[in-house]
Image (cartoon, rainbow, N blue to C red):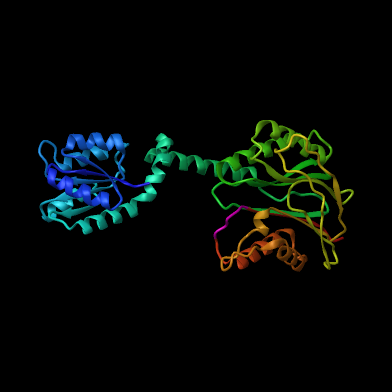
Amino acid sequence: MAETILVVDDDIDILELIEMSLTSDGFDVITANGGVSALEHAKAHSPDLILLDLMMPEMDGFAVMEKLKAEAQTRTIPVIMLTARAQTHEKVQGLGAGADDYITKPFDLHELTARIEAVLGRTRPTKYINPLIGAMGDWFSEAGVEQLASHLQTAAVIQQKLLPATAPDLPGFDIAGVLRSSMAISGDFYDFIPLDDNRLGIAIADVRGKGIPAALLMVMIRTALRLVSREEASPAAVLKRLNDLLAIDTDPDLFATMIYGILDSTAMTFTYSNAGHCYPLHLKSQGTQVHPQMAGGLVLGSFDFADFELDTIYCEPGDEILLYTDGVTETERESDDALYSEERLTETFQASGHLSAEMLCQAIEDDLQDFSGTHHRNDDVTILVIKANQC
């Protein structure tokens, strides 16, 4: 689609000359021979650029620019001044009033086109962003942006407080978790829910997407989990209840993956169900092999008919279980975009199996950093380690 140029000049001959030249260059041209008609055309047609003569009777170019910049509809339209004077103070005044460039009469038509292309090249991205900003209204005023930033900061603080403040104290086990968000607020979460003196509910989840929608759904799931886990004895029943709630109240495209399990210090077991989440890894105390636990199920929230399997990991002293989100295995290497992968995670897990749960989380984080070569994360990263203490 051709871009539209509004040419404003009280000299009819100049108007016709510029119109012919710019039309031959592929632009749509609108003309106005005075300030009042220029403002009317600017509001009616929202041109991509305005060529504005400064010296006009009744309303000069400076007055036109002032009114353009005062209106939300026209304030972002770029302006090139046309002036018969080459005086420095006039150029400074025009640029200070909001003009993007100036050209002095008499001008070369090729230079005029080049100046127009240069200004449009700088302002085209803004043209496509502005309608969205306008639709958001007062949120994108200076005060609105400050308020939104304050709300995000508050949300991040609240969300951080929802994470476990300390590692749980369950006899026979060393447990640690870590979450590193790629944004101010996260769609990942993990939780420890005391059920009685010898049983602990453990959850790790990853909400589809990032930012505010993911964070809101995360809080909703975490709140429901805390209630349901105390009413249902089976992890499969807990996930079934959560899924039924989400399938009713959320869009199918907004879903979560999750593992919820019960760690029992009397039986030395971790009995869990998996809703489409990354498979847990089980490292035996001998440290010779890591076993992926393959129980799975549908994601939470997309299907109202979903059911979930139960699986049990039997823990001997020194055994370790690793839970994680796909932000770990899908971390990209900066140099070639290769993925960290489950294979590398398994190797790191096995090589660091002698460490405490907290130090093992740190070892995986360090290896992720060494692999990626950058401090920037494209996705949230959550790691949770359960280690059966040695006798």
Residue 71 visible somewhere in the drawing: no
Seen as rendered, the residue at the extreme right is 267
Count of marks placed on residues: 0
Q: Is residue 153 above or below residue 316?
A: above
Q: Position of residue 256 (x, y in %)?
A: 68, 43
Q: Residue at x 60, y 65 (%)?
A: 333
Q: Nearer the viewer, residue 369 or 158?
A: 369
Tell me which segment is drawn in magenta. Answer: 376-380
Looking at the image, residue 194 sits to the left or right of residue 69; the answer is right
Tell me if residue 263 is in the magenta stretch.
Answer: no
Quadrant of the rendering where the C terminus is positioned? bottom right
Q: Is residue 317 above or below residue 252?
A: below
Asked if one can make out residue 119 in the rendered structure from this viewpoint, the answer is yes
Residue 154 place in picture, x, y as percent: 52, 41
Q: Main secondary structure of the magenta part?
A: loop
Q: Decide whether residue 379 is among the magenta residues.
A: yes
Most foreground residue, 138 or 108: 108
Residue lying farthest top? 248
Residue drawn at (22%, 55%) of the image: 112
